[in-house]
């Protein structure tokens, strides 16, 4: 079984056989999320940066499940200080697990929270699940690195923020999708708060006009990988 489930905002859950990889698990406090981590098998937690709408419940989930938080060094240290298990990497680092690999790549964004003034650099992350390449762009702005990411990794799925204000807006995300040349584009980081409310159908139209497939997943909707 290989599934990618959207949990709302920038949170996703990848399941591969007996492994469960949570990404940016902002569940508590997210009015759109409905995910009970106690009912799922979670083996790894990947966090792109320290903002609380991305770090979310990661520390509590790690404490409950024993799953390590994989994050940039400074953020990983903070998670360990809070009693979580963590693995600290840095931009460019790749880790290998039974389910595949995760590589930390650049993002143009910040990384802090009220309890952590400096969380290291913000990241985007690339997963290789038995040859299925999934790129989660984190909270980045539009950046020229997308060209290099396409050239080196050819992601099949691109998970892109479209809400604007804190990240790319949908116009920039459409450019990003074109640069990445992903087969399927999944929008994220929209409609959670008033600042990032968008009409997602407009984004779907833009992506389809470019000849790419857009999957605006509803919360808890999934694709089979
Ligand atoms: Zn952020």
Image: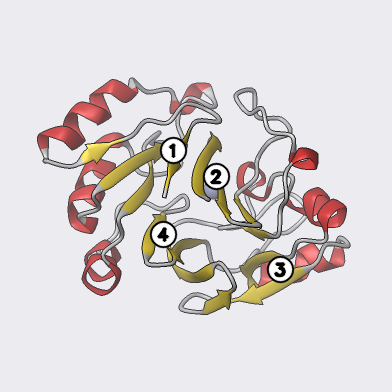
The answer to which of marks 2 and 1 sits earlier in the sequence is 2
* Residue at 43% in and 44% down: 224
Residue of label 4: 108
Q: Mark 2 near ligand 1 (CB under 8 Å)?
A: no
Q: CA distance from mark 4 to mark 3?
A: 19 Å
Label annotation for residue 139? none
10 Å crowding of disc 1: few (<14), some (14-19), many (20+): many
Between 14 and 95, the one nearer to me in the picture? 14
Q: Mark 3 near ligand 1 (CB under 8 Å)?
A: no
Q: Are marks 2 and 1 in contact (CB under 8 Å)?
A: yes
**Image spot of residue 101 (x, y percent):** 50, 71
Q: CA distance from mark 2 to mark 3?
A: 19 Å
The answer to which of marks 4 and 3 sits earlier in the sequence is 3
The answer to which of marks 1 and 3 sits earlier in the sequence is 3
Label 3 sits on a secondary structure element that is helix
**Image spot of residue 155 (x, y percent):** 31, 60
Residue of label 3: 76
Q: Are marks 2 and 3 in contact (CB under 8 Å)?
A: no
* Residue at 47% in and 62% down: 125
* Residue at 33% in and 20% down: 199
**Is residue 155 toward the left or the right of residue 45 in the image?**
left
Q: CA distance from mark 1 to mark 3?
A: 24 Å
Residue of label 2: 12
The answer to which of marks 2 and 3 sits earlier in the sequence is 2
Q: CA distance from mark 2 to mark 1?
A: 10 Å
Q: Mark 1 near ligand 1 (CB under 8 Å)?
A: no
Q: Quadrant of residue 148?
A: bottom left
**Is residue 28 toward the left or the right of residue 123 in the image?**
right
On screen, residue 217 above or below 100: above
């Amino acid at each position: 079984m290989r599934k990618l489930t959207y949990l709302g905002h920038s949170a996703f859950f990848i399941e591969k056989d007996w492994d469960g990889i949570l990404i940016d698990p902002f569940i508590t406090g997210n009015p759109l999320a409905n995910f009970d981590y106690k009912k799922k098998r979670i083996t790894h937690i990947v966090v792109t940066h320290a903002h609380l709408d991305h770090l979310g419940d990661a520390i509590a989930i790690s404490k409950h499940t024993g799953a390590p938080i994989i994050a940039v060094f400074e953020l990983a240290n903070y998670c360990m200080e809070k009693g979580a298990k963590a693995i600290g990497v840095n931009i460019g680092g790749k880790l290998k697990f039974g389910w595949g690999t995760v590589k930390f790549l650049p993002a143009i964004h910040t990384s802090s929270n009220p309890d952590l003034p400096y969380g290291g650099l913000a990241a985007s992350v690339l997963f290789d699940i038995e040859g299925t390449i999934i790129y989660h762009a984190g909270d980045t702005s539009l950046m020229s690195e997308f060209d290099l990411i396409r050239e080196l990794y050819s992601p099949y799925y691109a998970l892109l923020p479209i809400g604007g204000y804190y990240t790319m807006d949908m116009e920039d995300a459409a450019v990003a999708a074109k640069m990445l040349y992903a087969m399927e584009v999944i929008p994220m980081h929209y409609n959670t708060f008033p600042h990032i409310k968008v009409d997602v159908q407009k984004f779907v139209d833009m992506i389809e006009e470019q000849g790419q497939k857009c999957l605006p997943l509803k919360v808890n909707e999934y694709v089979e990988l």
